[in-house]
Image: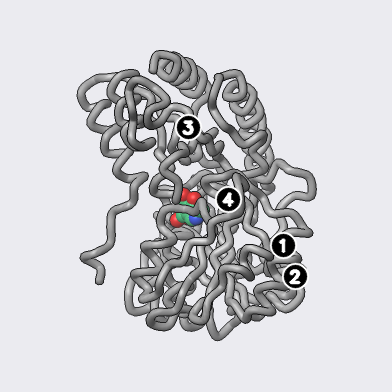
Amino acid sequence: MGAKITPSATAAIEAAVAARRGAGLPVYRLGLGEPDFAVAPEIADAVFRAARAPAGYTPTAGVLGLREAIAEMFTARLARDVRPSDVIATAGAKQAIYLALSVVCAADDEVLIPVPYWVSFPEQVRLAGGVPVYLDPPGASDRLSAQSLKANVRDRSRVLILNSPNNPSGIVYNALELEEIAAACVELNLQVISDEVYSAFVFSAGGHRSIATYAGMAQRTIVIDSASKTYGMPGWRLGYATGPRELIEAMVAIASHTTSNASSLAQAAAEAALRGNQESVSSHREEYLARARWLADRIRSIPRIGAASEIEGGFFLWLDLSAFLGSRTARGFRSVDDLAASALDETGVALQPGTAFGSPRHIRMSVAAPEAELRDGVDRLEAFLEGL
Ligand SMILES: Cc1ncc(COP(=O)(O)O)c(C=O)c1O
């Protein structure tokens, strides 16, 4: 089974960027989603302290102090009592999502994935033995609705993956939408994996809400979050999940036979981060919001790009480049992949084609990039598109 899995498309762009940099050529990375801030000093200090202590294995689910901190965070978010035994710390949200799929998915169960989606969802579903089923939102909208969920559910549909704020669309589901989707999940008896890794970066009114807080959802939802985006430490690999205790225990059992515990150094970092004053999170949110507003305005000034009017949350702007594809320009690009390859080759601008996220017409742009690189990159992209 594993031999049929394709590598992550974002990793392929990274490789092309690295090759260009290796050749001494300039690169403007507009598509990747990595926090570009150093970690807060108290987080780094915690790692140094932990590195001087004995480096034994920890409990598979994580050290108690970290699980207490994660449980307190989820207790506040979910407005119910989450205990340390209800959580697991993992090597990033990516591992948490995979473990969650492994426990909720029986062979050939269908897992519903709204389009556009984060690249790893379909392949993780396949790895877990399930079948990905894509939910295309109606019309030009990128929003899943309870109606479209009900209209597309089939006999073997068992699980919905909901990602809000969304990578790549930047959508944040509001309270009414979540309430309706939650009611549909109860009616259809679906389990939900709620990927909330961008929860710290919500810009729309109302802030972040978890679908797990709605009626009937606590017992059918596994909530996933991560220190990667929130605390700017993606390379250290520390994610977390909570959900019904028997499902979390099953996730811990699988981890105990595969990876064992997440790195003890990353656990120390995440505990310090969750226990810290959260000032760096607020200042990063402000910074990302300022960049998101600037980028959305700048993109609107470029003719013929179809853009989401605002980023509601997360790091990404999702742009429709249909007007530059096919016979609409002399270059005749067949897909955004061809367009992105030429843009990188001719201008050094690294775009993330939407194909791997479920749309061959879109590209994804990220605000998690240094501001100067964003400005220069968008100028170059505009000149490139004008010349087509
Ligand atoms: C929607 C989404 N979920 C999960 C992840 C994985 O995050 P982590 O670094 O915690 O594994 C990412 C990372 O890009 C993401 O965008």
Q: Which residue is mark 1?
A: 178
Q: Are marks 4 and 3 in contact (CB under 8 Å)?
A: no
Q: Which mark is residue 321?
A: 3
Amino acid found under the numbered disc labelled 2: Tyr
Which residue is label 4 attached to?
166
Instruction: Name the residue nearer the viewer: 378 or 320.
Output: 320
The residues bearing labels 2 and 1 have C-alpha atoms spaced at a distance of 8 Å
Say which element carries label 3.
loop
Give how far across and how far down residue 127 sits, in percent: 34, 70
- Up the image or down, 181 lies above or below 15; here it is below
> Colour scheme used in the picture?
one colour
User: Dots 2 and 1: beta carbons under 8 Å?
Assistant: yes
- Ligand 1 within 8 angstroms of badge 4 C-beta: yes
Q: Classify mark 1 as within 8 Å of ligand 1 or not, answering yes or no.
A: no
Give the mark, 2 or 1, whose residue is nearer the N terminus: 1
**Of callouts 1 and 3, the N-terminal one:** 1
Q: Residue at x 73, y 59 (%)?
A: 177
Residue type at numbered disc 3: Leu
Q: Please tell me how crowded label 4 is: few (under 14), some (14-19), or many (20+) other residues with Cα within 10 Å.
A: many
| Alpha-carbon span between mark 4 and mark 3 | 19 Å
Amino acid carrying label 4: it is Asn
Write down the residue under mark 2: 214
Query: Marks 1 and 4, Cα distance to the nearest angstrom?
Result: 14 Å
Q: Are marks 1 and 4 in contact (CB under 8 Å)?
A: no
- The residue mark sitting in front, 4 or 3, is 3
> Percent x, y for residue 368?
52, 35
Label pair 2/3, CB-CB below 8 angstroms: no
Q: Secondary structure at mark 4?
A: loop
Q: Classify mark 1: helix, strand or loop.
A: helix
